[in-house]
Image (cartoon, rainbow, N blue to C red):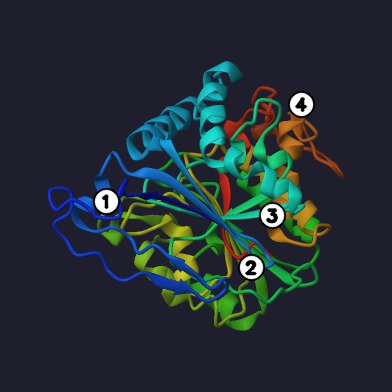
Amino acid sequence: MIYVNFTPTSTKVSETKCQTKLPSPQIDRRFGYQIPAPSQGSCATVDSDELEIVMITGDGETIRRRIPEANRAKVLAKTREFQQAINNPQTIPANYLKSSQQLYQWLIQPLEEDLEAGKIKSLIFAMDTGLRSLPIAALHDGNEFLIERYSVSLIPSLSLISLPYRDIRSQQILAMGSSQFTDQTALPWVPVELAIILEQFGKGKSFLNEGFTLHNLQNQLHQGRFAIVHLATHAEFQPGNPNNSYIQLWDRKLRLNEIQDLELSQRGVDLLVLSACRTALGDPQAELGFAGSALAAGVDSTLATLWYISDRGALGLTTEFYYQLSQAPTKSEALRKAQVAMLHSNLRITNHQLYSSDKEVSLPLEVAKLRNINLSHPYYWAGFTLVGNPW
């Protein structure tokens, strides 16, 4: 577990920098670590605050590192630079590697010896404001990406995750989505995506377009015991009023503040997959967008996206993810293997065929007209992030 925070350069916060009293720190009962309370008022934007990293191992050991040369202003500026470079799939590696490697040096390198000594393979990050949309999987050490060595996941600050392990490989999946819309661009890959993932996972139900209504979603959740709910459609997170953010169903928009009304946790949903646009990216008030809302509503884990994901990239990653999920012991490891498969071109779209680790799928005519695509660029795989319980 790695907490990444910005802390004042001295123990006394200057009154000129902070006019609001800080709340008391809270205890994370999983590790017995006193987590720094979130800053309030003008305290949250002090550029000189220094980067501090606290790692708690599975054995309960606490390791603290402060990086004086990396203050809030420098780290957030480099994060924005990295995000802008990686969001363009036409970008040559050199354009995003420089900022990726600098962020790696600040956020990961101070812990490298401890990670290796502890033989750690899975990292859970709790990030300070401004870093929650960082594609951690694509941080680079000069030789390889972080995801090639570690599975990674996120939790919102000060939120708890459910520790008990539940093997969902024998459970059912509810896959729903839309490929046609009256006021938005079509998503011709969605029917292929739904068909493949249902075949990959083996058990469950699938509904497309007219079957993807709020009434049917609620009805299916009420009738069945689905451990996984997969929604493939347009979605948008807009900071501010929850009514501005939505997941597009066939008949209406599902608003951010309506997630809890689905009673996903009461229905036994362990994993929510949002194969859509910008569903993990939120704002300081809404933590991690729809993913954070699902976590608050009781869903253990949500696989969501940090930026406007290519529907071809979504098809590739989700196809591989469900295959790996049927093999891997944890959700975070399944995601890691899917991302590495894309990175190493073991998953690709060539000559109207989708090639994954275990199958070759002929794409329908509407989809096959599109050009061949190289999915190895981090734009296609690094935007997917697992929020909540990595197991």
Q: Which residue is mark 1?
A: 44
* Residue 122 circle label: 3
Q: Amino acid at mark 4?
A: Thr
| Mark 3 Cα shell of 10 Å, populated few (<14), some (14-19), many (≥20) | some
Q: Is residue 147 left or right of residue 300?
A: right
Q: Earlier in the sequence, mark 4 or mark 1?
A: 1
- In this rendered view, identify the residue nearer to me: 318 or 78: 78
Q: Earlier in the sequence, mark 3 or mark 1?
A: 1
Q: Earlier in the sequence, mark 4 or mark 3?
A: 3
* Residue 60 circle label: 2
Q: Which residue is mark 4?
A: 350
Q: Amino acid at mark 1?
A: Ala
What residue sits 68% from the left and 77% below the top? Answer: 164
Q: Position of residue 379 (x, y in %)?
A: 57, 32
Q: Quadrant of the N terminus?
A: bottom right
What residue sits 61% from the left and 45% below the top? Answer: 111
- The answer for how far apart the CA atoms under marks 2 and 3 are is 15 Å
